[in-house]
Image: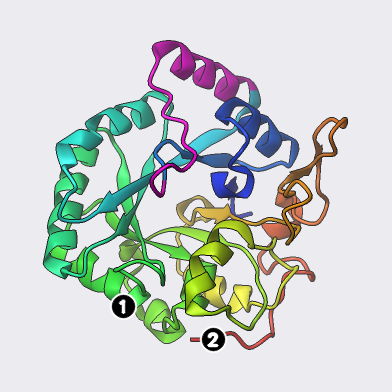
Amino acid sequence: MIPLSLAHLSELEVPPLELIELAAQAGLASIGLRTAAASPGGIEYPLRSAFEQGEMRRRIKATGVSVLYIELVSLSETTKVADCRAMLEVGAAIGATRLAVAGDSADVGIVADRFAALCELARGYGIAVDLEFMPFRAVRSLEDAVVVVRRAAQPNGHILIDALHVFRSGSSLETLRGLDRTLLGTFQICDAPRQAPSAADLATEARTRRLLPGRGELALWPLISPTASRCPSPASFPISIRGRAWRGSSRRPATSCSRGPHEQARPDPQWTQPQLARHPPAGDLRLDHPGRG
C-alpha cells in the first residue's frame, strides 16, 4: 500500500501533537506541519524550543506517525536563504525529510537561484525541497515549476504536485506523465467541484474549501496512477491528503478524524489508510470523471 500522510492544512487549527494523534487514529503514516505561515499573519507552529521538539519526538515514537514535511517558505527577491536555517534545524530535530516552498517572483531566475541555494542548505540536514506551484502565485503551473527546478539542477530539488493546483492551473497531465520521476516530490490529493471558481477566489478555495478525496469531481486516479506505477516501491511515492469535509464555516472541518465538540477523535471511514491506499483505490475515489488539463 502507498503510505498516506495528513496535510496540516486539513486541520490547521490543530497543534502538532494533536495532529499526530489524529493521523494515528486514522491509520495514516505521517503528517505535514505548517512550521512557518504561508501568508502574513497566518497560522504557524515554529516548534523552536527544545522542549517542544522533545515532546514531538516522544509522540512520534509512541504512535509510529512520522513527520513527512514542513512548510512553507516563499521564494522571491526578499528571501534570505540563511534565515531558513532555524526552520531546517527544527525539521531535522523532529525527523522531517522534506520542505515545501512556493515561488513568489515573476523573475524565474530569482526563484531558481533562491531554490538552488535553499536546496544546498537543506541537503546538510538530510531534507529534500519540494516546489509547490499554485495558480494564485507567480510560479503558477506545473510547466513553471519544471523550468525552475531544472534550472536550479539540485539533486534534492523536486516539484510538489497538488491535485487542486494541477486542475485549477490548467497544467498538462501529459507533461506530468512525461516527467522524469526524479523531478517529482510529494503528491497532495484532495477533491473539489469540477467547475473552478473565479480567479479571485482560487486562493480561498485552496485554503478553505477543499473536499476529501472521493467527495468531489476531480479525476484523481488518472493524475496519480501513471507516476505511482513508475515508482520502485510504495514508500518512494509520498502522498499527502488535504481536504475539508464541510464547505461552510459554521462547522468544524473534518479530516481523518471527525469530532464534535464533546467527542473523542475517531477515524472517518471514508478515507482511512486501508481504503485510500489501495492500488487501484477504493471505489469512492473518482476514476473516470474528466478533469481539466
SS under mark 2: loop
Tell me where residue 184 appears, x and y as whole percent.
37, 63
Along the viewing direction, whichever of 176 and 91 lies nearer the viewer: 91
Residue at the image point whose x is 51% and y is 78% from the top: 167
Q: Give the mark nearest the N terminus, 2 or 1.
A: 1
Residue 34, which numbered label? none
Q: Which residue is mark 2?
A: 292
Is residue 136 shown left or right of residue 190?
left
Tell me where residue 237 appears, x and y as whole percent.
48, 57
Q: Is residue 267 above or below residue 52?
A: below
Tell me where residue 219 appears, x and y as whole percent.
63, 79
Along the viewing direction, whichever of 246 and 222 lies nearer the viewer: 246
SS under mark 1: helix
- For residue 46: magenta? yes
Along the viewing direction, whichever of 260 and 54 lies nearer the viewer: 260
Residue at the image point whose x is 63% and y is 83% from the top: 195
- For residue 165: magenta? no
Q: Is residue 68 above or below residue 292?
A: above
Q: Let me know if residue 229 appears in the view.
A: no
Residue at the image point whose x is 69% and y is 64% from the top: 213
Q: Is residue 109 above or below residue 217?
A: above
Is residue 23 shown left or right of residue 16?
right
Which residue type does callout 1 highlight? Glu
- The magenta segment is 38-62
Q: Is residue 222 above or below residue 136?
A: below
Residue at the image point whose x is 79% and y is 71% from the top: 283
Q: Which residue is mark 1?
A: 143
Is residue 211 shown left or right of residue 56?
right
Tell me where residue 59 appears, x and y as whole percent.
59, 21
Mark 1 Cα-neighbour bin, 10 Å: few <14, some 14–19, many ≥20: some
| Residue 244 image-quadrant placement | bottom right
Q: Residue extending furthest top?
A: 51
